Amino acid sequence: MKRIGFILLCLACSAAAQAQSDSATPTVYWVQFANKYQSPYSVEHPEAFLSPLAIEKRQRAGIPVTEEDFPVNPEYVRRVKALDTSLRVLNTSRWMNSITVYSAKPGIQEAIQALGCVGVCERTATLKQPEPDTAAYRFSGFPERPTTHAAPMQYDYGEALAQVRLNNTHWLHRMGYNGEGMRIAVLDGGFKNADSIRHFQYLRESGRVKAVRNFAQTYANPFREGNHGTYVLSCIAAYLPGELVGTAPMADIYLAQTEDNRMEALVEEDNWIAGVEWADSIGCDVLTSSLSYSTFDDSTNNHTYAQTDGKSSRASRAARMAAERNLLLCNSAGNQGMGKWKFVGFPSDAIGIVTVGAVAPNGKSAPFSSKGPTADGRIKPDACAVGWETRVGAPWNKTIKSSGTSFSTPLMAGMLCCLRQAFPLASTDELIEALHESGSHYATPDSSYGYGIPDLLEAYNLLGNKHNDTSLVSAVFPGHTATGTSYSFYLRVKKACSIDIHGTSNSSPDTITGIQEACGIFIKKCKPGTHRIDVKLPDLDSDKQWDVLIINIASYSEPLKRHGKTATKKPTTACATHVLGIDKETPVLQRNTETPSYTKRHVLNLSHLGKLEIRR
């Protein structure tokens, strides 16, 4: 009898200890509401939840505000909070209609699930220590000082030269597109010492760090942890001429810590979603995320390859929704190419985003770069940039080498920021289409390169000619840079017409204030067929390392005759405005473009353009 009493006492103590343990277990839950009924928000007043910049961006692109954009119903949030006075709302999601909450109260998950307004309540993280009940981190800005920087065409990239030149990004810079006036959000795991190291001195002093948030540990300073995010940011925004210059060095920067460095848990996807929605709400143009999810500390939450359909993961669904709202989102493919997983992760599988793979500075595919395709057969990656021995800025004030798709992704995001600056009215889909078409493997995509290494100068020309009328003539340009004294392109003439071709030397389009001469040829009664145009290029003298030529092509219908009298010509039909870069240095990546056979040859002499006097 005493033995039975002793056993019962032990069981009681054990139960009490277990209850005490349960009550002391800090846990994070994802709560998705069933609907948005009786919402206090409306499409007529988006200013209640979107910034003026975000609203203007939507209106410019013709994208309506819908109920999906409404914040969660505050009454539903109040009902959840009423279940536990110590419960804290960590993040919210408009698009998922959800909140992420923190509580240590036993039975809280069941109590939340029982609410009529709740659709799903799931545990997304179990913490080892309670979260401190302190105020959220607030960014107060950096002291601004008068600053100067080199004109884009004079950037000295230093150690970053190869990773900029591989994708021909330097030509965008030379034309004046360096990210100025564009807004780019960077989501990562913290940005250690980005508030002090020299790589970002110009960024800070020019007042271009516009906002900083922490969605993972709301109370923590994102500048105190996370080497990774500092590396990532330097790929875009570093400005140390002669040592390291990023791909969008003049862009406005918005920083968000979404990665929780204490664990690998499903809550990080929800933090990520909160960061993406924040970027949308403040009107960002581009977002870069060097984060990928597939496996977690709690293996019951692990994803499978079959789920890489762009729909299964809520982070991937949120990425697609961001793209639909004209936010150009770049995400790293991942570094599992040599591991068991091998394939792109989440949200890299998302529809409508740019998934970025890694290559070496010479264009060789990095073996660690995660591979495509997705489970539903879509080609991934969408683009590749240097992610193998990438030059990055480190939190200890040094420029170092580091490898991973984590670094090819921000490089590509900065490039796209410059491209979007050049074409602010282009949709996300149009920009991605141009990126694909300019890829080195566009005609023969594979699992490692995807669409390949894009040529940003070619993408620029594709976008510039996207809406031109080619009913009479279409132009074929085998390449977009020239290193000698001659260059050839082709015209496919579909109907008899007259063609005017002229060129302009314009190496400094943003500073030239004087006259810009043009010269060209006029081909009268050009017959249908393929015509080759041999261009004599201007020589580059010892002081001039490069030049930019703009080749304009216009076609005219043949004059119409009525009763023996010639009527006026039909309006001009522009078929191409092509930017050709002339450089003393050979492009890093040589394009193997087949040249068509032709029926007639013409000569366009632009050699004297280099001798024109440009008044500044």
Image: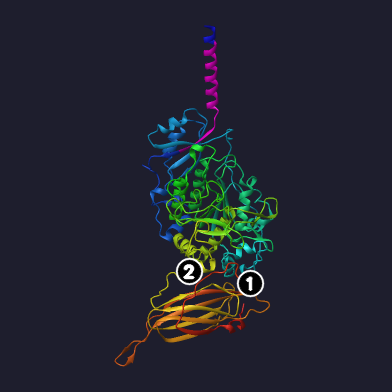
Image position of 481 with respect to 297: above or below: below
What number is the disc on residue 462? 2
Which residue is at the far top? 1
Magenta residue span = 6-30
| Circle 2 SS class | helix
Q: In screen coordinates, is 595 left or right of 210? A: left
What residue is pinned by disc 1?
Answer: 585
Q: Judge whether residue 422 is colored magenta.
A: no
Q: Residue at x 63, y 68 (%)?
A: 151
> Left or right: where does residue 181 sit relative to residue 97?
right
Quarter-wise, where is residue 166 in the image?
Answer: bottom right
Residue 483's x, y, as percent?
60, 75
- Residue type at the position of mark 1: Glu
Residue 351's quadrant in the figure? bottom left
- Say which of 415 and 481 sits in front: 481
Q: 441 or 523, which is in the foreground?
A: 441
